Amino acid sequence: MLVIYVDADACPVKDEVYRVAKRYAWRVVVVANSHLWVPTDPLVELVVRTGFGAADDWIASVVGPGDITITADIPLAARCVAAGGVVLDAKGRLLDAASVGEALAVRDLMEDLRQAGTVSGGGPAAMTPKDRSRFLSQLDTTINAIRRANPS
């Protein structure tokens, strides 16, 4: 069974994931550094991994071809794509084998510029209703593409 893994600690679209996954009867594994609320549903599981990077390491160790990971963490996204999965960020950006390399390069460049003091980080822009709509649309499109590629 294909799975949606949610890097949950700072994920603003968990409720949207639960709603879409329920519609398609897809399993959701919510991975966090501490306990948090998840719906009481046999298709939803909470996995808690404490320690720096432990949740990311766990996701990267279990994700497989056709699985979807929801994360804003670009290095984790690259690891998931290398394992055959696809990644969506909370604003609906799809990261796959064709796009994750560029995203990782931009992330690394920006990190180098911040460390050099050339640019200062203000963090990501706040989520808007349009971002949530884009995320929902892309999650639906991605699930349908995976279902067509894996009809079993």
Image (cartoon, rainbow, N blue to C red):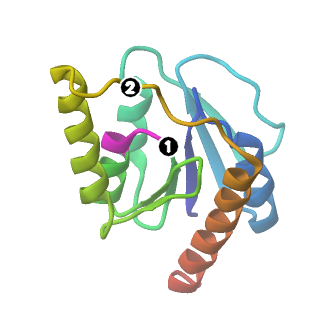
Q: Amino acid at mark 1?
A: Thr
Q: Are marks 2 and 1 in contact (CB under 8 Å)?
A: no
For residue 142, side relative to residue 72 (left or right): right
Judged left or right of residue 106, residue 148 is right
**Residue that badge 1 annotates:** 71
Q: Quadrant of residue 23?
A: bottom right
| Secondary element at image label 1 | loop
Q: Secondary structure at mark 2?
A: loop
Total tally of numbered discs in the picture:
2
- Start-end of magenta stretch: 72-76
Q: Amino acid at mark 2?
A: Gly
Q: Position of residue 137 (x, y in %)?
A: 69, 67
- Point 29% across, 42% down: residue: 107
For residue 121, the mark is 2
Quarter of the rendering containing residue 143: bottom right
Name the quarter where the N terminus is drawn. bottom right
Tell me which label, 2 or 1, sits earlier in the chain. Answer: 1
**Vertical comparison of 12 with 64: above or below:** above
Q: Quadrant of the C terminus?
A: bottom right
Residue at the location (40% across, 14% down)? 51
Q: Residues within 10 Å of mark 1 (few under 14, many from 20)?
A: many
Decide whether residue 111 is among the magenta residues: no
Give me the C-alpha separation between circle 2 and circle 1: 19 Å
Q: Residue at x 44, y 29 (%)?
A: 55
Coordinates of residue 24 in the picture (x, y in percent): 75, 67
Q: Is residue 148 above or below residue 94?
A: below
Q: Position of residue 138 (x, y in %)?
A: 62, 66
